[in-house]
Each structure stands twice: as C-alpha cells, then as structure tokens.
Image: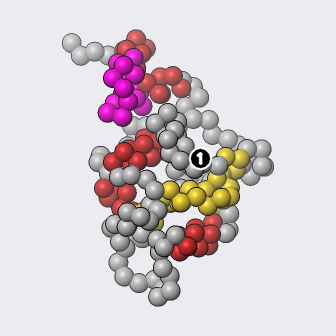
C-alpha cells in the first residue's frame, strides 16, 4: 500500500501532464483538504474529514488528441457505467476501509477499475473534487477498448460479483446468461 496520503494508479503506457500534481495540490489546498505551509511532515493520515474531497478527478486524452474524456460532475451513473478512470487520485483511507481488498484481480480490461470505484462509493462514499482539464495522456497513440471481445458476458460477470448493488432480476438474468454461455458450470 502507498506510504503517502494520496494514491494514483498509472498504467505503464499512460503519462501525465507535467502540471498535474501542481494543479491537484493547489485544488486540494483550495478545498482545505491539505496544507503544505509547514512542508512535508508527520505520518500519512488514515482518514480524511468527511467534508473534504477523497478523490481528485481530471480528464484524459490520447496523445494525438483524437479522443478526450472528462468525468461527469456527479456519480449518479456509476452504477451503470464506469464514470471515473483508475488514474484519479484517491485518499489512502479509501483503500484501508474497503472490503474485500481495493482491487480484485478477477476483473480485467478495465472492469477492475469500475469494480473499485463502485465498491468504494458504496462502502466509503466518494467525494470528488474535479480539476477541469485532460491531465492524463491515456495510452498514447491508441485507445483501450474495455472488454471488447465479449462485453455482454463481462457485464454479466461484473453484476454477479457485485450482486448486492444491483436489482435481483438483473443479477438473476446475469447468472442465467453466464450459465448458458458455458463460462461457468453448475456443480453437481
């Protein structure tokens, strides 16, 4: 686990704008969530005041500017789609409070990101501070397509793993789809 107060996950083929951390720290200072007047000191905190943001979101774009995405201002759509990218900064208290572990390796192709944000929002509560520019260069030169080979079955597996966040009928339909597909077999 990270040793500082804020965590940022970054894929090996992503890059950040050189101004990202200066802008994030300035935004957090303006929100009263951090103070750097006394310099770095003390142990990392394991909690953050409930009126302070615990996530810093910013947009992303491809290096060739062929694609740009900005996260929505509210999280009302998080249940139905991943509205935050994994490179958003989050306070370490989120990872410490989540059960099971923050990132579950059972998911792939970006679904682990959505799983993390959905569970964090439901278990801890996300308070997002938006820094309004595309500060992440996402897979320079190409765009990652989430679970493009079989998105229907990926979503069914996702609903099954997070069944307590979805309506019973949705989960039952997902289970039926998984069983019909042969991805899993009934024990006998």
Which residue is at a point 50% across and 45% down the rendered structure image? 75
Q: Where is residue 170 in the image (x, y as percent from the top left)?
A: 40, 22
* Viewer can see residue 91: yes
Q: Quadrant of the N terminus?
A: bottom left
The colour scheme of the drawn protein is: secondary structure
Which residue is at a point 68% across and 55% down the rendered structure image? 134
Image quadrant of residue 169?
A: top left
Q: Is residue 97 magenta?
A: no
181 with respect to 67 (left or right): left
Q: In which quarter of the image is the C terminus?
A: top left
Residue extending furthest toward the bottom: 38
User: Element at badge 1?
Assistant: loop
In this picture, is 4 found above or below 57? below
Which residue is at a point 53% across and 47% down the rendered structure image? 74
Task: Decide which of 28, 145 is in the foreground and name it.
Answer: 28
* Viewer can see residue 138: no
The number of discs equals: 1
In this picture, is 147 found above or below 4? above
131 with respect to 45 (left or right): right
Image quadrant of residue 3?
A: bottom left
Which residue is at a point 32% across and 51% down the rendered structure image? 98
- Count neighbours of disc 1 (C-alpha within 10 A) and say few if under 14, some if 14 to 19, many if 20 or more: some
Task: Decide which of 184, 78 is in the foreground and name it.
Answer: 78
The stretch in magenta equals: 157-173
Q: Where is residue 47 in the image (x, y as percent from the top left)?
A: 34, 66
Q: Main secondary structure of the magenta part?
A: helix
Residue at label 1? Answer: 72
Task: Decide which of 21, 127 is in the foreground and name it.
Answer: 127
In this picture, is 36 found above or below 107? below
Residue extending furthest toward the front: 51
Q: Position of residue 82 (x, y in %)?
A: 52, 40
């Amino acid at each position: 686990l990270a040793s500082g107060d804020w965590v940022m996950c970054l894929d090996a083929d992503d890059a950040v704008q050189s101004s990202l951390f200066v802008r994030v720290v300035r935004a957090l200072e303006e929100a009263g969530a951090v103070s750097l007047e006394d310099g770095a000191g003390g142990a990392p905190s394991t909690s953050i005041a409930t009126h302070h943001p615990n996530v810093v979101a910013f947009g992303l774009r491809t290096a060739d500017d062929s694609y740009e995405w900005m996260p929505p201002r509210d999280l009302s759509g998080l249940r139905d789609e991943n509205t935050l990218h994994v490179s958003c900064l989050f306070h370490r208290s989120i990872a410490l409070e989540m059960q099971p572990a923050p990132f579950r390796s059972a998911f792939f192709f970006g679904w682990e990101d959505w799983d993390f944000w959905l569970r964090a929002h439901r278990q801890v509560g996300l308070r997002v501070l938006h820094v309004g520019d595309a500060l992440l260069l996402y897979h320079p030169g190409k765009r990652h397509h989430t679970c493009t080979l079989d998105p229907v079955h990926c979503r069914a597996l996702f609903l099954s793993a997070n069944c307590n966040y979805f309506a019973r009928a949705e989960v039952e339909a997902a289970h039926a789809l998984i069983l019909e597909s042969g991805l899993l077999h009934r024990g006998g």
